[in-house]
């Protein structure tokens, strides 16, 4: 597990750490980007496992539900090279045209007084390219991509139970808030003493659900992150 810093935090920052998901947290991904990633993953499974498109789509979903990431199922059951898989399933031209950020996210991101770390299950090349296109990258202190979430030589992306204590060790006891659109990620983080904020902006078609357990804070746009107490 490692944190790759883009820039070192200056002395005036507070002791807080904002752990920020990317897709459907800092930008709208469900309209174009995520469906295209699903299509590329389905095509990859079909080509490399000799499946028809329907079988490939069902297996992609099965691995995602079981392991939290399709990649993990491919690695475990088919010895897939993770770097080849990620490079083959996150190919985009014109990223800026495919996504839209939540209002004034760059401005709000830059105003947060704590350490700002992106924590995403996306590959680094995609995450960095998208953040640069959308004016977000310059406001981040670090990016933790899926390639960085390796614990004991095993890939352990969100929501892996072992990820969170390792991350807390890296943060050296600082107060942390995870902002994510995936409830399961928040539940696991909360079990390890990380504060959470569930972002559920309207219009994505997800089934409504109530806050439960240790996940107690919800926002509907990123600008409302200032209401989170931690």
Image (spheres, grey):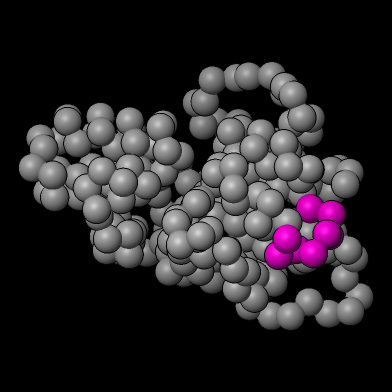
Q: Residue at x 45, y 39 (%)?
A: 68
Q: Residue at x 13, y 44 (%)?
A: 49
Q: Please state the total of marks drawn on the protein image.
A: 0
Nearest the viewer among 131 and 116 is: 116
Left of 49 or right of it: where is 32? right
Residue 67 falls within the magenta-colored stretch: no
Specify the quadrant that holds the N terminus.
bottom right
Left of 50 or right of it: where is 62? right
User: How far across and down, in percent of the image, does residue 81 sit?
Assistant: 27, 60
User: How far across and down, in percent of the image, does residue 129 sit?
Assistant: 46, 69
Examine the image and state in which quarter residue 220 appears.
top right
Nearest the viewer among 159 and 43 is: 159
User: How far across and down, in percent of the image, does residue 207 sit?
Assistant: 54, 20
Nearest the viewer among 155 and 185 is: 155
Left of 147 or right of it: where is 227? right
Q: Residue at x 25, y 29 (%)?
A: 58
Residue at the limit of the structure toward the front, as seen here = 152
Q: Residue at x 77, y 30 (%)?
A: 214
Examine the image and state in which quarter residue 193 appears.
top right
Left of 214 or right of it: where is 49? left
- Work out whether 9 lies above or below 127: below
For residue 72, say whether it is visible: yes
For residue 101, say whether it is visible: no
Q: Which residues are magenta?
A: 169-176
Residue 172 falls within the magenta-colored stretch: yes
User: How far across and down, in percent of the image, does residue 196 sit?
Assistant: 74, 41
- Work out whether 136 lies above or below 23: below
């Amino acid at each position: 597990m490692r944190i790759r810093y883009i820039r070192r935090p200056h002395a005036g920052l507070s002791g807080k750490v904002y752990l920020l998901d990317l897709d459907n947290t800092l930008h709208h991904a469900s309209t174009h980007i995520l469906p295209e990633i699903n299509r590329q993953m389905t095509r990859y499974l079909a080509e490399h496992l000799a499946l028809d498109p329907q079988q490939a789509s069902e297996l992609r979903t099965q691995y995602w539900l079981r392991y939290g990431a399709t990649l993990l199922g491919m690695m475990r059951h088919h010895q897939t090279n993770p770097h080849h898989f990620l490079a083959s399933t996150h190919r985009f031209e014109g990223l800026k045209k495919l996504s839209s950020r939540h209002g004034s996210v760059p401005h709000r991101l830059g105003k947060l007084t704590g350490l700002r770390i992106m924590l995403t299950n996306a590959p680094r090349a995609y995450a960095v390219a998208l953040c640069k296109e959308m004016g977000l990258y310059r406001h981040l202190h670090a990016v933790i991509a899926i390639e960085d979430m390796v614990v004991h030589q095993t890939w352990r992306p969100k929501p892996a139970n072992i990820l969170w204590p390792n991350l807390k060790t890296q943060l050296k006891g600082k107060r942390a808030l995870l902002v994510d659109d995936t409830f399961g990620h928040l539940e696991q983080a909360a079990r390890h003493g990380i504060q959470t904020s569930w972002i559920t902006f309207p219009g994505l078609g997800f089934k409504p659900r109530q806050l439960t357990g240790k996940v107690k804070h919800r926002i509907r746009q990123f600008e409302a992150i200032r209401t989170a107490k931690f």
